[in-house]
């Protein structure tokens, strides 16, 4: 028997696993206000409960990774007072782990080669729910004559996968009808995001995933993949996505303004307001240390607005 478990049992206190959260930006450009909201939400959720907070660079896609962006992201996080635990993990260095997971799925006959192009899928498929097009199953029973392997897909069952999101509430999705068999290895040889993220979360012991609601519809696929690989499923909380005045998600494509490391107190204050925490006006522009001290004492996930999208200035009037 583990001594700690024995002591906890005799004291009448049930031992709880430590909270482990994470922030996993893609180094495709500088952090913006939407990135700050996700980082602050995950940081406060973990640290306010005495947990650990990790940083992972999702630099798996070489076509989207910009040279120097990862270093700039880390420097910005430091300027905003974030303190992460342990070394930063880079997905580009994790290929052996993803390959092993792929082989596990192959040994269980859970994946199959697909020879369809995006154009062909778009012409034959129906629109999915937050996942683009639902794959019509063209190659499910073998590659049709004349087609060669392009990608690898995970075979999904006709079943509903549901989970209780700690912000958005109960979310359910029939994978076969609303998502379809999905890619785990892309045609260009890059491991797909769903595979990488579930392998990394399990390897790092992540217990709580707090991120933007733009990934809400993708979560059932990740849970399905976790079960297929015998991996634990963390608790999920999907925060409102910050959008501009045109309703577009803040990002590189919408030319979102990068965070200014020289003025962290203003943006961090606005992020706390956006997250429904209601910091006092006198903390606007304060030192990040003061804002974190206030936020960590008063963080309440239940106060986060239960919407999928929110104009970044709506909650704070800027």
Image: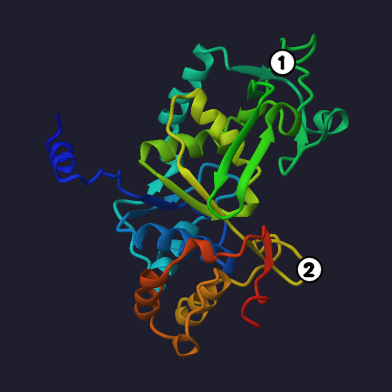
Q: Residue 242, percent across and down?
A: 64, 65
**Quarter in which the N terminus is drawn:** top left
Within 10 Å of disc 2 (Cα), the crowding (few <14, some 14-19, many 20+) is: few
In x, y percent, where is residue 272?
Answer: 50, 73
What residue occupies the far right of the structure in this picture?
A: 123
Quadrant of the rendering where the C terminus is positioned: bottom right
Q: Where is residue 22 in the image (x, y as percent from the top left)?
A: 42, 52
- Residue 218 is situated, as x and y percent measured from the top left of the image, at 63, 41
In depth, the one of 198 and 293 nearer the eye is 293
Colour logic: rainbow
In the picture, the disc for residue 113 is: none
Measure the alpha-carbon separation of dots 1 and 2.
40 Å
* Mark 1 Cα shell of 10 Å, populated few (<14), some (14-19), many (≥20): some
Seen in the picture, residue 305 relative to 229 is either above or below; the reply is: below
Question: Relative to 179, is 147 above or below?
Answer: above
Using the image, determine if residue 151 lies above or below residue 178.
above
Which residue is drawn at the image coordinates 41% and 29% (left, top)?
A: 96
Q: Can residue 277 be seen in this view?
A: yes
Which quarter of the picture shows residue 250? bottom right
- Mark 1 vs 2, N-terminal side: 1
- Residue at left 46%, top 90%? 282
Q: Is residue 190 left or right of residue 15?
A: right
- Examine the image and state in which quarter residue 262 appears: bottom left
Pointer 1: what residue? 140
Q: Nearer the viewer, residue 110 or 112?
A: 110
Query: Residue drawn at (38%, 73%), measured in percent from left and top?
Result: 292
Q: Do the CB atoms of the residues marked 1 and 2 lie less than 8 Å apart?
A: no
Q: In this view, does 78 lie to the left or right of 27?
A: left
Secondary-structure class at tag 1:
loop
Name the residue that disc number 2 marks. 246
The residue tagged with tag 2: helix, strand or loop?
loop
Residue 81 in sight from this viewpoint: no
């Amino acid at each position: 028997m583990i001594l700690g478990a024995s002591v906890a049992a005799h004291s009448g206190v049930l031992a709880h696993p430590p909270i482990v959260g994470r922030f996993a930006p893609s180094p495709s450009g500088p952090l913006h206000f939407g990135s700050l909201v996700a980082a602050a939400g995950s940081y406060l959720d973990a640290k306010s409960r005495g947990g650990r907070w990790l940083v992972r660079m999702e630099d798996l896609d070489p076509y989207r990774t910009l040279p120097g962006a990862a270093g700039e992201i880390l420097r910005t996080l430091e300027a905003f007072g974030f303190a992460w635990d342990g070394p930063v993990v880079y997905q580009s260095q994790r290929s052996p782990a993803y390959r092993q997971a792929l082989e596990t799925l192959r040994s269980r006959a859970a994946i199959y080669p697909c020879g369809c192009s995006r154009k062909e899928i778009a012409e034959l498929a129906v629109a999915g729910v937050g996942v683009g097009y639902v794959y019509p199953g063209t190659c499910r029973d073998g590659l049709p004559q004349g087609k060669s392997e392009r990608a690898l897909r995970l075979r999904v069952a006709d079943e509903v996968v549901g989970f209780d999101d700690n912000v958005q509430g109960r979310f359910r999705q029939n994978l076969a009808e609303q998502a379809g068999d999905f890619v785990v290895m892309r045609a260009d040889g890059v491991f797909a995001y769903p595979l990488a993220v579930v392998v990394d979360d399990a390897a790092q012991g992540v217990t709580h995933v707090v991120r933007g609601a733009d990934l809400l519809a993708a979560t059932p696929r990740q849970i399905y993949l976790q079960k297929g690989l015998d991996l634990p499923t963390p608790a999920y909380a999907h925060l409102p996505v910050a959008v501009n005045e045109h309703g577009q998600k803040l990002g590189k494509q919408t030319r979102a303004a990068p965070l200014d490391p020289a003025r962290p107190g203003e943006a961090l204050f606005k992020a706390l307001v956006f997250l429904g925490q209601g910091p006092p006006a006198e903390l606007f522009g304060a030192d990040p240390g003061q804002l974190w001290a206030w936020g960590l004492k008063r963080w309440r996930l239940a106060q986060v607005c239960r919407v999928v999208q929110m104009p970044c200035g709506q909650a704070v009037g800027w």
